[in-house]
Image: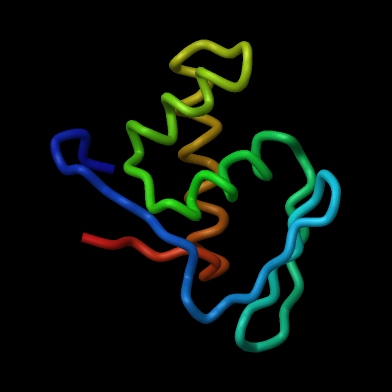
Amino acid sequence: MNPGVEIRFQIHPDVAWQQAAEEVFVVTADNRLHNLRDAVSVHLWNALQIDLSMESLVASLLDEFDVSEAEARDDLLAFIQEIEELQLIQRVS
């Protein structure tokens, strides 16, 4: 990802999801079910509800968890890559 370009994401409009306790269940248009179970994934999913930039998402991880900025950025990039490939989120301009 190019650090000079602000990339924003939002939850894909074709997915349905629900949070129950400490888990998020996401169903895609083709009826595939995805469970987000770890605290970081659930936190990031909830943050994506308000269409945050990468920098805002990193800041939210730093506020919520005891991690370094490098660790927060690495976790975020891995999460974004995974859920974007699954078409759970989409990039917005």
Kindly identify the residue that appears in the image at 50 percent across and 36 percent down: 76
Taking the image as shown, residue 13 lies to the left or right of residue 7, namely right
What number of labels is visible?
0
- The extreme left residue here reads 4
Decide: is 68 above or below 46.
above
Could you tell me residue 56's position as x and y percent? Answer: 37, 33
Which one is in front, 51 or 73? 51
Decide: is 45 above or below 26.
above
Decide: is 66 above or below 87.
above
Could you tell me residue 91's position as x and y percent? Answer: 33, 61
Decide: is 41 above or below 9.
above
Q: Quadrant of the N terminus?
A: top left
Q: Quadrant of residue 53?
A: top left
Kindly identify the residue that appears in the image at 76 percent across and 63 percent down: 25
Taking the image as shown, residue 69 lies to the left or right of residue 4, namely right
Kindly identify the residue that appears in the image at 63 percent across and 79 percent down: 28
Q: Quadrant of the C terminus?
A: bottom left
Q: How is the image coloured?
A: rainbow
Kindly identify the residue that appears in the image at 43 percent across and 51 percent down: 50
Could you tell me residue 5's position as x and y percent? Answer: 16, 43
- The extreme right residue here reads 21
Could you tell me residue 54's position as x and y percent? Answer: 35, 39
